[in-house]
Image (cartoon, rainbow, N blue to C red):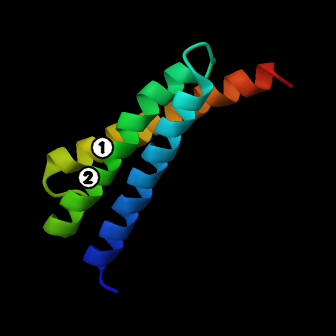
Amino acid sequence: MNISEFNYIEASLWFTCAVILFCTGIKVGKSSPYFKIILVVVPAFIAFGISDIIEAQTGAWWRPVSLLFLKAACVITIAGCYYQYYKINKGNT
């Protein structure tokens, strides 16, 4: 398996995460404290998957520079959503 194939597999992982979270968002409903987090994290996972498709074509995660910024924005967004999820769960214990 070469790096390009790995990137396509990784992209499918991020798309799968987005689909699962989207379905979870529908299941929990708008009244759930997690709903707003899901509204933010689903597009972030989709964008992260797209960035891996671009990476498979360019051969590098830092080329072009806009790809680096896209990946950084996705990671920061996903980490921020996890932090919000953690804060909600901390209050429920």
Question: How many neighbours does mark 1 have within 10 angstroms: few (below 14), some (14-19), or many (20 or more)?
Answer: many
Indicate whether 40 appears above or below 67: above
SS assignment at label 1: helix
Q: Quarter-wise, where is residue 89 in the image? A: top right
Q: Picture coordinates of residue 32 (x, y %)? A: 63, 18
Q: From this viewpoint, which residue is outermost toward the front?
A: 27
Q: Amino acid at mark 2?
A: Ser
Residue that carries the numbered disc 2 in the rendered image: 51
**Is residue 9 rendered to the left or right of residue 84?**
left
Dot label at residue 56: none
Residue that carries the numbered disc 1 in the rendered image: 47
Quadrant where the C terminus sits is top right
Q: From this viewpoint, which residue is outermost toward the top?
A: 31
Q: Nearer the viewer, residue 62 or 90?
A: 90
Residue drawn at point x = 59 percent, y = 30 percent: 27
Residue drawn at point x = 29 percent, y = 77 percent: 5
Q: Picture coordinates of residue 40 (x, y %)? A: 42, 27
Indicate whether 1 appears above or below 82: below
> What distance separates the C-alpha of mark 1 from that of mark 2?
6 Å
Q: How many numbered callouts?
A: 2
Is the C-beta separation of discs 1 and 2 under 8 Å? yes
Q: Picture coordinates of residue 84 (x, y %)? A: 60, 25
Residue drawn at point x = 13 percent, y = 54 percent: 64
Q: Nearer the viewer, residue 19 or 51?
A: 19
Question: How many neighbours does mark 2 have within 10 angstroms: few (below 14), some (14-19), or many (20 or more)?
Answer: many
Quadrant where the N terminus sits is bottom left
Q: Picture coordinates of residue 6 (x, y %)? A: 35, 74
Q: From this viewpoint, which residue is outermost toward the bottom?
A: 1
Residue drawn at point x = 51 percent, y = 45 percent: 20
Q: Amino acid at mark 1?
A: Ala
SS assignment at label 2: helix
Indicate whether 52 appears above or below 40: below
